[in-house]
Amino acid sequence: MTILSLFQLIVYNLLQVKLRDVIVFHCWRNSALLQLAQLFSQNYIFSQYVNLNSAPEHWVNFHKVYLDSELTKLGVFLDLSCSHSAYITNQSSRARLYSEHFHWLLYDETCNMSQLTALFDKANLSINADVSYVQLAEESNEGSLFTLYDVYSRGSHLGGQLNVTIDQSVYCNHSSCAVRQYLSELHTRTRLQQRSNLEGITFRQVALVTVLPLNSSAQELLGFLDSEQDAHVDWISRLGYRNNLHLQEMLQFNVSYVWVDQWSLNDTIGGAMGEVVNEHVELSTTAFVLSTARLRKIFPTTDIGQFRSVCIFRTPHNAGIKTGVFLEPFKPSVWLVFVALLMFAGLLLWLIFRLEHHWLRRYLAYIPSLLTSCLISFGAACIQGSHLIPHSTGGRLAFIALMLTSFLMYNYYTSIVVSTLLGSPVRSNIKTIQQLADSSLDVGFETIPFNWAYLNSSPRSDIINLVKRKVDGRSPSSIWFSAQEGVLRVRDQPGFVFISEASFSYNFVEKYYMPHEICELNEILFRPESSVYTIVHRNSTYKELLKQIQLRMLEGGMTQKHRRFYTKSKLHCFSNNYVINVGMEYAAPLFMALLAAYIVSFIILLLELGWAYLSRR
Ligand SMILES: *[C@@H]1O[C@H](CO)[C@@H](O)[C@H](O)[C@H]1NC(C)=O
Ligand SMILES: *[C@@H]1O[C@H](CO)[C@@H](O)[C@H](O)[C@H]1NC(C)=O
Ligand SMILES: *[C@@H]1O[C@H](CO)[C@@H](O)[C@H](O)[C@H]1NC(C)=O
Ligand SMILES: *[C@@H]1O[C@H](CO)[C@@H](O)[C@H](O)[C@H]1NC(C)=O
Ligand SMILES: *[C@@H]1O[C@H](CO)[C@@H](O)[C@H](O)[C@H]1NC(C)=O
Ligand SMILES: *[C@@H]1O[C@H](CO)[C@@H](O)[C@H](O)[C@H]1NC(C)=O
Ligand SMILES: *[C@@H]1O[C@H](CO)[C@@H](O)[C@H](O)[C@H]1NC(C)=O
Ligand SMILES: *[C@@H]1O[C@H](CO)[C@@H](O)[C@H](O)[C@H]1NC(C)=O
């Protein structure tokens, strides 16, 4: 009974890949099948049987009936010596069932390799095929020796050849199986590792270029993608192109190009996205922002960059007069205590002067009034000495204590004021899109379709307000600018807000702005930051392989290196390489306070004059 050895082999093979669901296409007698069923149930394997000798209508559309399962992986056993097995392989190829979701075990009792080649030469086999071909090598009464082969292709539709590689020989008797001998190196590595060489196949790659006409020669277009000039132009596509060159080097495939000048028309239609979704290409140079509709069609491999839409503007000069700065260093309670202290010191001084006059008989030219002694103590607070000082030791000590306290307070105060002025260029208090919509600032947008689409379709209430207040009813020419125009306008017209893609417009900022102008820029996120991902089609047979290699590039820092070259995500404000001018926004309150003081003192002077005049009368 050699068939028992075969059954043992099936179970052994399934358990090796930890599969417990199998469908068996066979043409054995039912009595033999009983033993197989028992063996499966002993090993907790769920099984289903299709007899290929039965009427063909039972297995017409068999892949819908039997193989359309929810399982992530299903074992399939097929006996190639059955008369209708060619039909099964033919239909499986059409339905592209030779994928990582099915573990195929093809059994060939006659050892006719040319039959295998005939069946699979043209079949839809690819890099992720999981197909083992089993030949019966020797049989005896005790058991049988089987030879296993690994079958795949680098991509039959891209010019890959059928590759049948010998793997191992397995000896099975009626009760168990064991590897007799490894016949190649295949067992040493995982399936993807063995197959990470795509020599001889040609990937189609969609390449996006928006700045050259598409009827330019391929050489010119490639030259543009390759060049390092104006790195910000189409940077997502050029970054992806660089990355894919490394990919090409590592996997050794060849590439043909499909040129487009659009990312996509809507979520999944048109442009580079459309080419990937329609499976016209395997690779795309440009990366995409993800959305739910896209995820149904594509598979993101790695995150290669950020898409940031920002609003930038310089703080307008009339952005509010800051009175706070000069009062901020101390809390009100400290101010209060300090003033009380000064007044108390003034009172004390006055008392001291009087005491000295009356009791120590030190006759001064005149006794300072209470107001004068308060003035002296105020002068001390401003680090001014006084020509009137007490003569007694106790009085002098009190005076020194007053000077010392004021000295410390004064130093706290000045250092805090200086650090506030140095630390921050004036920032606008507009921090959100809603505040921007409510403000009186002018707004302009970069002319990219994305902005247009986002303004028109965003459900966010602040964006709707922004559109209502800043876009509706204005002429397009006063709203839409190229990145360069917009950035220059932001520089020349404080208060003008420009909304654009950061990595692109920051190039102009670096080019045209003085360092202090960069420091004065305010930045508000127009929409939440999102990553852009390299993509392949959801059903791409290469997705795992490409993902692994791209992740390796990401970990190795290659992607990062290119990203740094092509994008600017941050502006550096070197705030200590220029002198801070205290502007009117800080100085105005002081001048106004001075003016008010003059007016008050003038009025008091008039009152005093009036008083003196009256008392003389
Ligand atoms: C490969 O699959 C496609 C469908 O994706 C099918 O149209 C084609 O006939 C298949 N080729 C073969 C040789 O089975
Ligand atoms: C092997 O298979 C091929 C194609 O199916 C057939 O032409 C040939 O006769 C077979 N050879 C043997 C020895 O069965
Ligand atoms: C599948 O069968 C059709 C005819 O039914 C045939 O034209 C085609 O070449 C076969 N494909 C394979 C891979 O054998
Ligand atoms: C077939 O695949 C194996 C790895 O599975 C590889 O070592 C071998 O070079 C391939 N043969 C051909 C002809 O490509
Ligand atoms: C089957 O082979 C194993 C070793 O490969 C041996 O231990 C066992 O006794 C054999 N069983 C029978 C029934 O021959
Ligand atoms: C490309 O097409 C435009 C018209 O669409 C034409 O004016 C231009 O001459 C063409 N350029 C080349 C190199 O063929
Ligand atoms: C890659 O393909 C192009 C055309 O498709 C061909 O000219 C070139 O020789 C191929 N290169 C390799 C290494 O196969
Ligand atoms: C994209 O456009 C096509 C037709 O132009 C439409 O059928 C499809 O629903 C649109 N998809 C989305 C997500 O808007």
Image: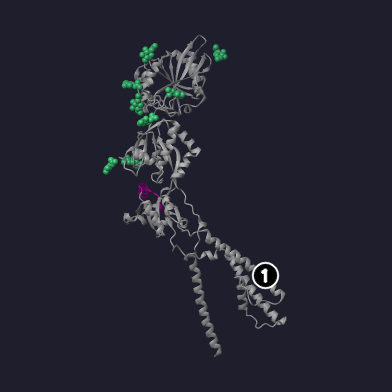
Residue 71, image quadrant = top left
Front residue of 104 and 417: 417
- Tag 1's secondary structure? helix
Residue 122 place in picture, x, y as percent: 36, 23
Q: Which residue is drawn at 53% across and 84% down?
A: 609
Q: In this view, does 367 lie to the left or right of 256?
A: right
Q: Is residue 526 above or below residue 426?
A: above
Residue pointed to by mark 1: 401
Q: Is residue 404 above or below residue 204?
A: below
Task: Determine if the C-beta at disc 1 is less than 8 A from ligand 8.
Answer: no
Q: Can residue 168 be seen in this view?
A: yes
Q: Main secondary structure of the magenta part?
A: helix
Task: Name the image quarter holding the C terminus.
Answer: bottom right
Q: Is residue 411 magenta?
A: no
Q: In this view, does 39 lie to the left or right of 443?
A: right
Please tell me in which quarter of the rendered image ligand 1 is found. Answer: top left
Q: In this view, does 190 lie above or below 563?
A: above
Read off the magenta span. Answer: 448-462
